[in-house]
Amino acid sequence: MIIRLKLARFFASTALLLTSIAAGLGAPNLSPLAKQPDWPSLEKYQETITRGEFEALLQKVYCAQGVDVSLIQVEGESARIAIDRDEQTWFTLRFAKDEASRKQPERGWRPAAALPRAPQGRELAGLKVTLDPGHIGGTWARMEERWFQVGDSKPVQEGNMTLLVAKLIAPQLRKLGATVSLVREKNAPATDKRPDDLKEVSKKILLRAGNPEPRDNFVGPDDPQKEQTVQWQNERLFYRNSEIRKRAERVNTELKPDVVLCLHFNAESWDDPAKPSLTDRNHLHFLINGAYLPDELAFDDVRFEMIHRLLSRTHEEELPLGEQFARTMSQRTQLPRYEYTTDNVARVGETGYVYARNLIATRLYHAPVIYFEPYVMNSDEVFWRIQEGDYEGIRNVNGTDRPSIFREYADSVVAGLLEYHRAARK
Ligand SMILES: [Zn+2]
């Protein structure tokens, strides 16, 4: 299930209104818990991209809704990106004159096409894959709102299911020659921060939003003022922000993969988690990084990460890989495309299953990232398949013969990656 952008927008709009309140969130133009960006680290991308390529990526992938000229300007042979809009400091990126004279960017990951040809049965030899089982699960599942229960049935906890799928995928990829790491191995947080550690930041966020004396706790999930309490802010900062930043730190400094696969299950709104509504809607889509909103680009760290992704050319790997997963998984699961009704995404590619979207994980991991969103957990069909648990072979589930939903998910991820490498390494 996708981390919604509502909060990011809320931060962004309030930050813009109240930039004079530094509020100790770092500099006023940093998003919560972000570090000061390392602009000099972009020097290695000088003359690695032509003006045409840079502008096409901005328009089609990263800033389809446009970009403020006080933040990014393209003129002649270079682009200027604001380091700090208020201080009028800029990073200047020099373009390559043409594709022939363009320098190769140095980066920590390798596209599939750069890996050597591999023998049959070991088609993924040399590939470093990191699996990111979405959410935390376990005792944290209720707090992170990835938990529901129908009557006395087994509770559905997204974080537990994504870890189960990751553990089914990992040995299959290893058998094909890949080196596989998981950003978490159990249903426990990667971050060592806990919600209460983030109180001061939460209070400052609420102050920025014009709430100088917030209540400490909310009463229950239905509390209409929930989002204005310190507790709710603490929890969100913990499981969504601090947790993913910690995973990104591991990915970028320790694991250094060629590709990251973020595994999720989707959901439609279930209202009360103790009396959830089931739906007949079931669908599939994939997210890759892009579609930054103008409000989000006003944050110095977000703008920096976008430019870093653009220049490291992750899109060139994410798009064809995402399209391959779309073909393989749609065929194996028979799930229809999910159609977004919001404006925070841009459809990319030909299959119709792949969207660009600015999520914290797709933004912060320094490698191509594919974010999987198959299966609506609270659809009638998927709910009963989840209740059946994991099993070998085929069983009759609610009137239809089915493999375990977890194996169907895992096997189709493996098949998609294998197919992609077979074609790319020829
Ligand atoms: Zn999810």
Image: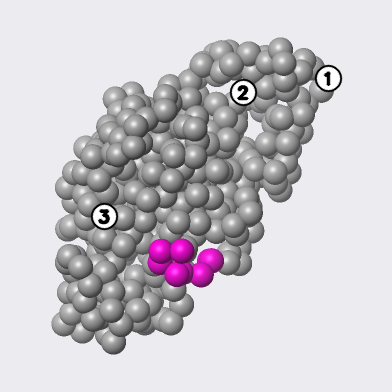
Residue in the foreground of this view, choosing between 102 and 88:
102
Question: In the displayed image of the protein, which residue is found farthest to the front?
Answer: 120
Question: Quick check: can you spot residue 328?
Answer: yes
For disc 1, the marked residue is 76
Mark whose residue sits in front, 2 or 1: 1
Q: For the residue marked with disc 2, what is the amino acid?
A: Ile
Q: Which quadrant would the N terminus be assigned to in this image?
A: bottom left
For disc 2, the marked residue is 83
User: Where does residue 298 sit, x and y in percent of width and height?
Assistant: 62, 38
Q: Is residue 246 above or below residue 143?
A: above
Please give the name of the residue rendered at 17% of the width and 47% of the height, measured from the top-left corner.
186
For disc 3, the marked residue is 165
**Stretch of the chain drawn in magenta:** 331-338
Q: For the residue marked with disc 3, what is the amino acid?
A: Val
Question: In the displayed image of the protein, which residue is found farthest to the right?
Answer: 76
Measured in 3D between alpha carbons, the distance from the residue under mark 2 to the one under mark 1, in whole angstroms, is 20 Å
Element type where label 1 sits in the image: loop
Q: Main secondary structure of the magenta part?
A: loop
Which disc number belongs to residue 160? none
Measured in 3D between alpha carbons, the distance from the residue under mark 3 to the one under mark 1, in whole angstroms, is 49 Å
Measured in 3D between alpha carbons, the distance from the residue under mark 2 to the one under mark 3, in whole angstroms, is 41 Å
Mark whose residue sits in front, 3 or 1: 3
